[in-house]
Image (cartoon, helix red, strand yellow):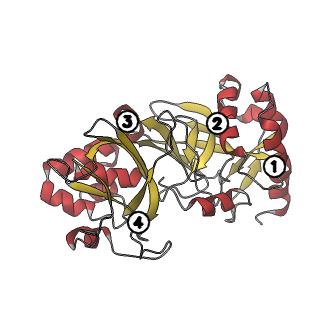
């Protein structure tokens, strides 16, 4: 998803964070709303990726996790809340799994392709930019199309989300997930609209951007090219419909319990307590199961809101401050404070 290569992310999830930041061990009584959360729901999501954590810090805990009958006691007994980089407020945003209309073959309104990775593209190398790919038709006629959709703006935002569902014109559906990117850094078109004076920062949301691009097709196309990053997909054939999209750990993420984080600070698979402010405050134990190109820093998280338009509207208006606290195995937390960053 919005994901890095799964193997790289899994490796990062089993070692210490590698960038220096202030570290403070807290107590569970310091977590606002901790006692009121549904810890059993968080534990269930935690166990879905826990088996992938091979670090000696995590393995004994994961071996016990599935046997626990009291989830809150489990977290309080085996973890310490650790505030990493807490000198600045956290920034919370939201993401979702979009649903697009499409077809396996080009025809009628379905004129905008979703591409699989070209064979010559090497992971980690810089390739053609978005503008070059689209204006020079770099990929056209090569048989790389997975599906064709009816809206180029939705196709653009699908690349930002990194995964989605395509409702086909024959009544079936397919799932696509992140495969690779062209090596260019992501650039926010929302920030670009603010820079141009089109909107104020508080006015910008995904829906506002989509509407502006559709009202201004020529300028809108140029705006989309402001983001040089381009994402390629793979078809996910064996992912059950009731499951969420695959995150960076190559496991399904769960609505309102999974977050994307910066794995340089927050180990993938770790429980994370979030205290989000804003119009809809949220106090909840989440699990770090995903990453994102725009998710950078110790106090940065992207909350997965689910699938479809409603989830997209909710996710699109989230840009709130707060605090996030990582739950680390007790030995790991103490070692981090004593020895610093390894």
328 relative position to 38: left or right? right
Residue linked to disc 4: 117
Query: Could you tell which of marks 3 and 4 lies nearer the N-terminus?
Result: 4
Q: Indicate whether 299 appears above or below 35.
A: below
Q: SS at mark 4?
A: loop
Q: Quadrant of the C terminus?
A: bottom right
Q: Compute the Cα span from label 1 to label 3.
A: 36 Å
- The structure residue drawn at horizontal position 47% and vertical position 76%, both measured from the top left corner, is 125
Residue linked to disc 2: 45
Q: Compute the Cα span from label 2 to label 1.
A: 16 Å
- The structure residue drawn at horizontal position 58% and vertical position 56%, both measured from the top left corner, is 262
| Residue at the top extreme of this rendering | 36
Q: Compute the Cα span from label 1 to label 4.
A: 35 Å
284 relative position to 342: left or right? left
- The structure residue drawn at horizontal position 27% and vertical position 57%, both measured from the top left corner, is 113
Residue linked to disc 1: 59
23 relative position to 37: left or right? right
């Amino acid at each position: 998803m919005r994901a890095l290569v799964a193997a790289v992310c899994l490796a990062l999830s089993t070692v210490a964070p590698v960038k220096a930041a202030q570290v403070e061990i807290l107590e569970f009584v310091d977590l606002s709303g901790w006692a009121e959360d549904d810890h059993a729901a968080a534990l269930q999501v935690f166990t879905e990726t826990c088996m992938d954590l091979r670090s000696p810090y995590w393995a004994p805990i994961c071996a016990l996790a599935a046997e626990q009958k009291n989830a809150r006691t489990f977290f309080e007994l085996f973890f310490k809340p650790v505030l990493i980089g807490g000198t600045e407020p956290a920034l919370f945003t939201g993401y979702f799994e979009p649903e697009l209309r499409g077809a396996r073959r080009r025809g009628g309104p379905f004129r905008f392709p979703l591409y699989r990775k070209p064979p010559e593209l090497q992971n980690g190398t810089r390739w053609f930019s978005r503008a070059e790919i689209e204006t020079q038709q770099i990929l056209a006629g090569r048989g790389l199309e997975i599906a064709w959709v009816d809206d180029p703006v939705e196709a653009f935002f699908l690349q930002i989300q990194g995964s989605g569902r395509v409702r086909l014109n024959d009544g079936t559906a397919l799932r696509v997930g992140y495969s690779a990117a062209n090596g260019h850094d992501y650039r926010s078109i929302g920030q670009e609209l603010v820079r141009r004076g089109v909107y104020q920062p508080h006015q910008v949301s995904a829906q506002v951007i989509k509407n502006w691009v559709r009202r201004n097709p020529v300028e809108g196309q140029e705006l989309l090219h402001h983001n040089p990053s381009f994402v390629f997909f793979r078809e996910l054939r064996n992912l059950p419909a009731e499951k969420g999209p695959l995150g960076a750990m190559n496991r399904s993420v769960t609505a309102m319990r999974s977050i994307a984080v910066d794995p340089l600070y927050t180990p993938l698979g770790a429980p994370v307590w979030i205290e989000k402010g804003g119009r809809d405050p949220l106090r909840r134990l989440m699990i770090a199961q995903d990453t994102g190109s725009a998710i950078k820093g110790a106090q940065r998280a992207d909350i997965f809101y689910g699938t479809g338009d409603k989830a997209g509207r909710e996710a699109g208006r989230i840009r709130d401050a707060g605090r996030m606290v990582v739950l680390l195995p007790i030995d790991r937390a103490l070692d981090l404070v004593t020895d610093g960053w390894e």
